[in-house]
């Protein structure tokens, strides 16, 4: 590998199963490539259902001792994991940029963000409070306990190779659960590096395992195995629905962080410069490949032209480059399929009267680089209005009134993030309450933080990650009825 790390032992070519580093019995591997260069970054095992079962058995064996520790004991180990992740921030960021493509500055940011979930839930491990309820008769007392669900599975995507793992493993381990993680095949190296550091931090064998390989085979075992009591998934709505069906047979608890189709509404009274910067942050981060990226921009008639012009001028300044190079702002898309999808959406939009004001085509750098794009004159009839773009393309739709904006914004099966810019305080409250989305950014384009609950409504999923609410996704309530 051409990757230069301070600590080369973070780059693994094997998987972490019940405390052992192992290769596939079949000898099969998956090659991980750098989307910016096409170069091989590493290889990881392509594991089967058999090895997945071993990881699940290991998690089950580790469960009694792990869940029996006090919250404070688990917190101390998690705190060490947080500190070791931060101490290795540069190497972890370099691995991430190499396998995922995002600019190094964003990778460094993601490592800090990922670590913050471990820190937060280390703190929460000590605060898993139950309840007492006044009895319904003089000779009964009612107590509510919160207990770990048990063995959990996580299936995670490639767009946030570290944070989507720590958001699940952090609360799971803090709650006293054990976990088997299957990272996306495009970005398994970040996941394995996190396991190296978990082991160093003193996470006991079997408490956290990581298996790489065929989604269908590993996912099949994780969802069918009755030992697994909970699945947490982040990815597309399409795959999430498949996994929910697979989990139905053993009635697993699930947390689903699925797709989004975020509206970004700019009202006439908005601070336009702030709205443009918010749109840049929300739309173009990670080259548009996040589930909370603004997908449909709505601008009110009075400021429509001015907003499109300002936004287009700003987008033209975004620096497209290999994420590992100095000052890169937009890296390549993850793969060819992502590139084709963006091209098709633009072709459809232009065919229906959309006007490209900046960008619109593959970037001169080649590979999977795409020019940051703005499309004026977008309408609800276009495919881009309904589909998750997952690329650096911003369609801007004109609207007249507040009610119309709310109706259009809500006219989607998704309900993850929404954003709007405006200064009329009454309208701010009205719109915030009317939007059918789990997260609403008001005069703010960046909403992700470990201290707030992240999650969606409608077909964007169920459950919440982060905040005091996030740990509930890994806890069962048990009611004790005591006769005295
Ligand atoms: P994206 O569109 O972000 O790639 P996907 O939903 O396709 O999202 O993938 C997210 C994660 O789900 C990845 O780890 C992928 O390997 C996994 N995955 C995809 N299809 C399946 C499946 N049928 N069963 C289990 N896991 C799957």
Image (tube, rainbow, N blue to C red):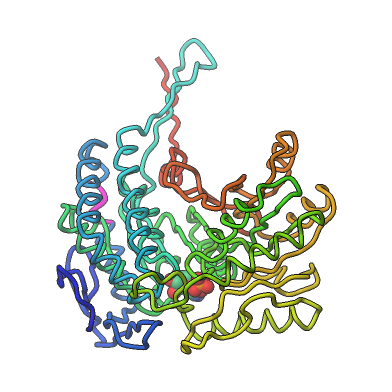
Q: Which residues are magenta?
A: 60-64
Rendered-image quadrant of the N terminus: bottom left
Q: Position of residue 416 (x, y in %)?
A: 60, 55
Q: Quadrant of residue 188?
A: bottom left
Which residue corresponds to the image point at 66% horizontal and 59% vertical from the top-left? 414
Horizontal and vertical percent for residue 226?
41, 60
Coordinates of residue 377 in the picture (x, y in percent): 78, 70
In the image: residue 5, left or right of residue 254: left
Q: Which one is nearer the viewer's eye here, 226 or 361?
A: 361
Which quarter shows the C terminus? top left
Name the residue: 52% across, 52% down: 446
Q: Does 15 sit above or below residue 362?
A: above
* Left or right, residue 217 beside residue 203: right
- Residue 467 found in image quarter: top left
Q: Can you see residue 220?
A: no
- Residue 265 located left or right of residue 452: right
User: Is 228 in front, or is 84?
Assistant: 84
Quarter holding residue 127: top left
Q: Main secondary structure of the magenta part?
A: helix
Is 240 located above or below residue 24 in the figure?
above
Q: Is 361 placed above or below 119 here?
A: below
Residue depicted at x 73% and y 56% = 409
| Residue 394 place in picture, x, y as percent | 64, 68
- Residue at the top extreme of this rendering: 138
Q: Nearer the viewer, residue 280 or 29?
A: 280
Would you say residue 265 sits in the magenta stretch? no
């Amino acid at each position: 590998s051409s990757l230069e790390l301070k600590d080369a032992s973070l780059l693994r070519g094997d998987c972490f199963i019940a405390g052992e580093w192992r290769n596939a019995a079949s000898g099969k591997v998956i090659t991980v490539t750098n989307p910016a260069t096409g170069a091989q970054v590493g290889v990881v095992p392509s594991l089967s259902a058999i090895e997945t079962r071993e990881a699940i058995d290991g998690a089950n064996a580790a469960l009694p001792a792990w869940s029996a520790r006090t919250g404070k004991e688990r917190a101390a180990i998690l705190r060490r994991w947080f500190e070791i992740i931060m101490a290795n921030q540069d190497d972890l960021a370099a691995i991430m940029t190499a396998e995922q493509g995002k600019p190094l500055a964003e990778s460094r940011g993601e490592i800090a963000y990922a670590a913050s979930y471990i820190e937060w839930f280390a703190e929460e491990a000590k605060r898993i409070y139950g309840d007492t309820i006044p009895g319904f008769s003089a000779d009964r007392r009612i107590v509510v306990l919160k207990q770990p669900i048990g063995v959990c599975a996580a299936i995670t995507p490639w767009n946030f190779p570290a944070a989507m793992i720590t958001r699940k493993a952090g609360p799971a381990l803090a709650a006293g659960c054990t976990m088997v993680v299957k990272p996306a095949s495009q970005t398994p190296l970040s996941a394995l590096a996190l396991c190296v550091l978990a082991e160093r931090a003193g996470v006991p064998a079997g408490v956290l395992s990581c298996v790489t390989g065929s989604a269908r085979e590993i996912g099949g075992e994780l969802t069918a195995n009755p030992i697994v009591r909970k699945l947490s998934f982040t990815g597309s709505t399409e795959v999430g629905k498949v996994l929910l069906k697979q989990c139905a047979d053993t009635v697993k608890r699930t947390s689903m962080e699925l797709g989004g189709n975020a509206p970004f509404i700019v009202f006439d009274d908005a601070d336009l410069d702030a709205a443009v910067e918010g749109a840049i942050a929300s739309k173009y981060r990670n080259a548009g490949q996040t589930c909370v990226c603004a997908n449909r921009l709505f601008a009110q008639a009075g400021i429509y032209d001015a907003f499109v012009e300002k936004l287009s001028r700003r987008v033209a300044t975004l620096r497209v480059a290999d994420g590992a190079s100095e000052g890169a702002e937009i890296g390549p898309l993850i793969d060819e399929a992502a590139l084709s999808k963006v091209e098709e959406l633009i072709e459809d939009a232009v065919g229906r009267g959309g006007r490209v004001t900046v960008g619109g085509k593959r970037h001169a750098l080649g590979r999977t680089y795409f020019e940051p794009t703005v499309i004026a004159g977008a309408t609800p009839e276009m495919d881009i209005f309904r589909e998750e773009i997952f690329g650096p393309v911003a369609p801007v739709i004109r609207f007249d009134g507040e009610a119309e904006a709310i109706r259009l914004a809500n006219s989607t099966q998704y309900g993850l993030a929404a954003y709007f810019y405006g200064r009329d305080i009454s309208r701010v409250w009205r719109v915030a309450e009317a939007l059918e989305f789990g997260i609403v950014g008001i005069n703010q384009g960046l909403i992700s933080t470990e201290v707030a609950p992240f999650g969606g409504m409608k077909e964007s999923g169920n459950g919440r990650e982060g905040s005091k609410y996030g740990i509930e996704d890994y806890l069962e309530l048990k009611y004790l009825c005591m006769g005295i």
